[in-house]
Amino acid sequence: MSTQIAETAQQHYQCYIDGEWVDSDSKLPVENPANGKVFASVPDCTLAQADTALASSQAALQSWKMLPAIERGRHLFNLIEALKPKRDLFAKLLVLEQGKTLNEAYGEFDDTLNYLTYSAEAARRIEGNIFPSDNAGEQLWIQKVPYGVTVGLCAFNYPLALIGRKVGPALVTGNTMIVKPHEATPVTAMEFAKAVEEAGIPKGVINIISGSGIAVGEHLVKSPITQLVTLTGSIRAGQAICRAVAENVTAVSLELGGKASFIVLDDADIDKAVDAVVISRYANCGQVCICAELVLVHEKVADEFTRKVLEKVKELTVGNPMDNPSMGPSVTAQGLDRVDSIVQETINAGATLACGGARPEGADFGGGNWYQPTVLTDVTADMAAAREEIFGPVLPIVKISSFDEAVEITNRRNDGLSCYLWSNDYRVIMDGISRLEVGTVFVNKQIVGYIQGYHSGHKRSGIGGEDGIYGIEGYLQKRAVYLNCN
């Protein structure tokens, strides 16, 4: 991998604060998850530098929000044009710091442009309302206005796409934004900042700062300057954000974790369901919040389904993500240790290891965060792999006797991000849409996320959401205007 590193990465990246490139005495190393070696570093910014970013975003806010929305949209189009020539660079950097396959990395880059394009095109579609007044000569308006300075906190699984997903709607609606990438995957964010500078976006409108989530992230979140915090991350991180913003009653938009049930009933198209679950579990090494985390398959078809799943999973390849295998490594060693711990606890509780369950063998896997595509059978709903969000390449399979049982297992959880339902009975499908307590239901469908949709969680899986017209609305607050013309 040394050739690709030399072609795509520089030794050290700086942060982008108030239109300037900023460094710090302390550095954060960035590891390649495929070999565990440090290939780059970024500043571990100080709280004073975080304050500079906050002040910069505040100073830029008034002139930015007073621009016509179409002008803000044109700035986003300029950013898109600055990004386009860098598709190969970003794809390789994503592989290096995140471990996803090269094809997945290209897909993430393309998704980033789609997020930004959707937001730029939404500039003429920001709507308010006019309601009848109770009195003559009056009008009642409901305007939608920006929050102000926003902070975007990004997860490590999609370090570039999440920036586009947050920056686009924040900027087009008149907010300014400070982006803080995850400590494990900050390099693409700094490369994104170069495109921001090239696009000529006014200083302070986008600041990109790296550092500890506990120190720098918390400081940004707790600042009275910050008016909205948008986080993509774990439930634990979302809970910490809620505590941190309590004093200032800062608005939050939280897209948090979940454990998607993949429900397969006895009338389902088994072959299509098998193809879908393998894609939906092992995409991005299982590190997607809406991945299929738990199969609930009807006992009448469980043996056939399981046999066919195992055939497909055993065909998956693991290797150098630059060579486009089926799956690359996990991002962090700590995350992988947790995955293996869940697997071992589940086996010790009586589950069967049907395939995988260990690091791949061979010299290529001596370093890095590697794990075999894993399937666990004879799992019961109370075992660790069925309870805990795994966020890794492990598929537990639980047999059920009815759809009601699947609904009960899904709804007993205190999170509710997504689930999958495979059935050809329209009555079951309509019932499931009504009863399943999740933000997204995939019906006879594999994992997907359309730009015009809405990505949100119920219960502890989040507050608010992203994408589509409702995602745009999440960056606007309402202002009532009672206009007396007498």
Image: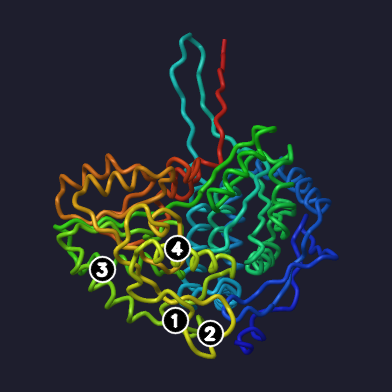
Label ID, residue 29 = none
Horizontal side of 321 relative to 174 (left or right) equals left
Q: Is residue 40 above or below residue 204?
A: below
Q: Which residue is mark 3?
A: 274
Q: Which residue is mark 2?
A: 365
- From this viewpoint, which residue is outermost toward the right? 25
Disc 4 marks a residue whose amino acid type is: Glu
Residue contact between numbered discs 2 and 1, judged by CB atoms under 8 Å: yes
**For the residue carrying disc 1, how many other residues have a C-alpha within 10 Å: few (<14), some (14-19), or many (20+)?**
many
Q: Position of residue 268 (x, y in %)?
A: 17, 59
Which sits earlier in the primary sequence, circle 3 or circle 2?
3
Disc 3 marks a residue whose amino acid type is: Val
CA–CA distance between discs 3 and 1? 20 Å
Q: Is residue 135 above or below residue 315?
A: above
**Residue at x 27% of width, y 49% of height:** 406
Q: Which residue is mark 4?
A: 345
CA–CA distance between discs 3 and 4? 26 Å
CA–CA distance between discs 2 and 1? 10 Å
Which sits earlier in the primary sequence, circle 3 or circle 1?
3
Mark 4: secondary structure = helix
Residue contact between numbered discs 3 and 1, judged by CB atoms under 8 Å: no
Question: Who is closer to the viewer here, 53 or 432?
Answer: 432
Label ID, residue 318 = 1
Which sits earlier in the primary sequence, circle 2 or circle 1?
1
Disc 2 marks a residue whose amino acid type is: Phe
Question: Who is closer to the viewer here, 14 or 81?
Answer: 14
**Residue at x 72% of width, y 54% of height:** 202
The N terminus - image quarter:
bottom right
Horizontal side of 301 relative to 352 (left or right) equals left
Comparing labels 4 and 2, the label whose residue is closer to the camera: 4
